[in-house]
Image: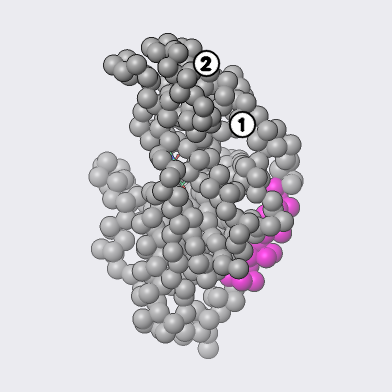
Amino acid sequence: MKRLFTGLQSSGQLHIGNYFGALKPFADMYAGYESFLMVADYHSLTSLKDAAQVRTNTIEVVKAYIAAGVDPAKAIIFKQSDVPAHTELAWVLECQVTVPFLMQAHAYKDKVAKGLEANAGLFNYPMLMAADILLYDADVVPVGADQRQHVEYAREAAAKFNLAYGETLKEPQELIAEEVAVVPGTDGQKMSKSYKNTIPLFATPEETTAAVMSIVTDSSGERPENVYQIHKLFRQDIDGLYAENKGKYKVLKEALAADINTYLAPMREKFNSLTDQDVQKILSDGAAKAAPIASAKLVGVRQKVGVTL
Ligand code: ADP
Ligand code: TRP
C-alpha cells in the first residue's frame, strides 16, 4: 500500500471551505492508502497566540475528521507536537536551504507584502512541513491548491539533502483535487477564516442560517452566483429552484440554509457525540504508532549528518 500523509493546522474554527477542500477529499480517499493524518499544532503557533484556542482547535480538527467519516482504526491520527522528530528534522532541513529560497514562499511573501511583521516560525514554516512529510516516506500528500508550493518545498528539501548526504529522503508528490473549486465566502472572496467570511461547519442551524442570510449578493444577474455555487456543493438538483425563483434572493438563501443544515446534521451529531477524552485517546494511540516510524527515519538522518558518534 502506498503511504499518504496530510495535515491540517489547528488555527481556527473550521468552515465549509475546509470541509470541501480538505476534510471530504481526505475522507473519500484515505482508506486506499496507509494514511497519516496530522494536526499541525506547532504550525498554528505561527498565527495563533491563544493557548486555549490552540487546544480547542486541535480537538475540533480531530472530531471533524471523524465526523466527516474517517475511521480512527484505519488511519494514524496524531498531533505534530507529540512527535519531537518533526521539529528536529525541520532544523536539519533548514540548514540545507537558503534564505532567498524560503523568501519565495507565498505565506511569507503575502504577509510582508501587506506590511505585516512575519515571525521566524512563519519564515521556516515550509521546512517544518517538509519534515512532517519526509519523516514518513510519504508517496502522496493530498492538499488544497494553496498548499502546492509547500509540497514542492518538501520535494526540494529532500533533493538537496539527498544530494549532500546520499539517498535518504523520499521525494513526495502532491495530490490536488482539481475538481474541488475554491468555495466562495459570504463576501464572494475565497472563504477563509482570515477574511471573516465563513459559514462554520459545526455551528447550530440558527448560526448557519444567519451566516447564509449575510451572503452578499450581486443584484445585476438573475441568479445570485455565489449562493448558487455554494448550494451546488450541497445539492445537485437545484437548477429548477433557481429558475423558479429568479431575483428572489431571500427565498434562495433560506433554501440554501435548509439544505446545508440537512446535509450537515449527521456530521454535527457525530461531532457532538465525541468527547475530548475520545480525542485524547485517538491522539495518544496515533502518536504511539507515528513516533517509532519518525524516530527510525531520524536515526538515519542523524547518522548521515554526523551528529551520531
Ligand atoms: P483558511 O483559508 O480558512 O485559513 P486553511 O488555510 O487553514 O484555511 O486551509 C486548510 C485546508 O482547507 C487547506 O487544505 C485548504 O486548501 C482548504 N481550504 C481552505 N479554504 C478553502 C476554500 N475556500 N475552498 C476550498 N478549500 C479550502
Ligand atoms: N500547511 C498545511 C495547511 O495549512 C497544514 C500542514 C502542515 C500539512 N503539515 C502538513 C499538510 C503536511 C500536508 C502535509 O493546510
Q: Which mark is residue 55?
A: none
Residue range highlighted in magenta: 279-294
Residue placed under numbered mark 2 in the picture: 254
**Residue 107 visible (yes or no):** yes
In the figure, residue 153 lies in which quadrant? bottom left
| Residue 220 percent coordinates (x, y) | 28, 16
Quadrant field for ligand 1:
top left
Q: Earlier in the sequence, mark 1 or mark 2?
A: 2
Is 112 positioned to the left or the right of 257 in the image?
A: left
Tell me which secondary structure the magenta stretch mostly adopts.
helix
| Residue 117 percent coordinates (x, y) | 32, 46
Direction bottom: furthest residue? 309
Instruction: Identify the residue at horizontal 53%, vertical 81% (top origin).
Output: 300
Quarter occupied by the N terminus: bottom right
Position of residue 230 relative to residue 114, above or below, is above
Given contact means CB atoms under 8 Å apart, are the residues at marks 1 and 2 in contact? Answer: no
Residue kind at label 1, given as amino acid type: Leu
**Residue 51 visible (yes or no):** no
Residue placed under numbered mark 1 in the picture: 264
**Any magenta on residue 287?**
yes
